[in-house]
Amino acid sequence: MKSLVVAVFALLLSITAAVAQNGYRIQPGDVLAIEVLQDPALNREVLVLPDGSISFPFAGSVQAGGSSVGQVASAISTGISPNFASPPNVFVTVRSLRARTNGVAVPDTITVYFMGEVGAPGARELPEGVTFLQALSESGGLTNFAAERRIQIRRTDPHTLQESVGTIDYRALSGGGRLTRDITLIEGDVILVPERRLFE
């Protein structure tokens, strides 16, 4: 009887959490856990970029900012449906929220975003003046699928909104190579580690 009560209580908690999450509006800097019931190989955590978008295999870019988890799940299911015999079941949960300070800036820190093949994708509050390699040490490390020669730093000019992309060969650096110049990160920089290609 006691185990039944515990099971019912756990079920109620999960339902309450699901309802609460479905009412939450996703924001840039949040990390979403996405599961595809029919193909667990697609399961992953993704970072919501500053423009509110996420990237998911077969679905491409999906707008998540301002949406509920249910709306994002539906959009991903629609996007990947052509690859399945019937519409797949997609589940989305908010794994972590970007730290918020009610609009008050925290002095001497910047927000840097990690996404792709890193151990801990998401937003990090780092000291001003932090360099690329210092920031990368906060990412949880690279996964076995990381394209180490093509790590990107994506930066958006706040005035023109134009994005610039720099590529870094981390494998060369780890083998003793040097950067031509020290790369100091700024607020909003995105460090993207792509998935390596088949023979890369």
Image (cartoon, rainbow, N blue to C red):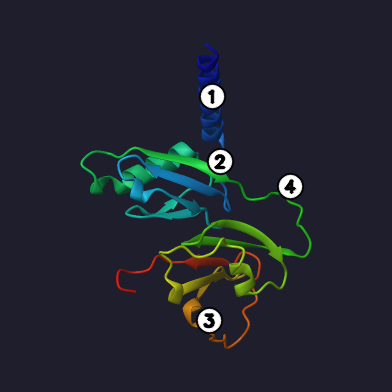
> Relative to residue 197, is residue 175 depicted above or below?
below
Question: In what quadrant of the picture does the C terminus appear?
Answer: bottom left
| Label 1 close to label 4 by CB (< 8 Å) | no
Residue beneath disc 4: 102
Real-space CA distance between mark 2 and mark 4, rounded to the nearest whole angstrom:
16 Å
Residue beneath disc 2: 25
| Label 2 close to label 3 by CB (< 8 Å) | no
Q: Amino acid at mark 1?
A: Ala
Tag 3 secondary structure: helix
- On the question of residue 158 being in view, the answer is no
Q: Residue furthest bottom?
A: 180
Q: Amino acid at mark 3?
A: Leu
> In percent of the image, x 50 and y 23: which residue is there?
11
Q: For residue 173, which numbered disc appears in the image?
A: 3
Disc with the residue nearer the chain's start (3 vs 1): 1
Q: Amino acid at mark 2?
A: Arg
Real-space CA distance between mark 1 and mark 4, rounded to the nearest whole angstrom:
32 Å
| Label 3 close to label 4 by CB (< 8 Å) | no
What percent of the width, then of the height, locates residue 10? 54, 24
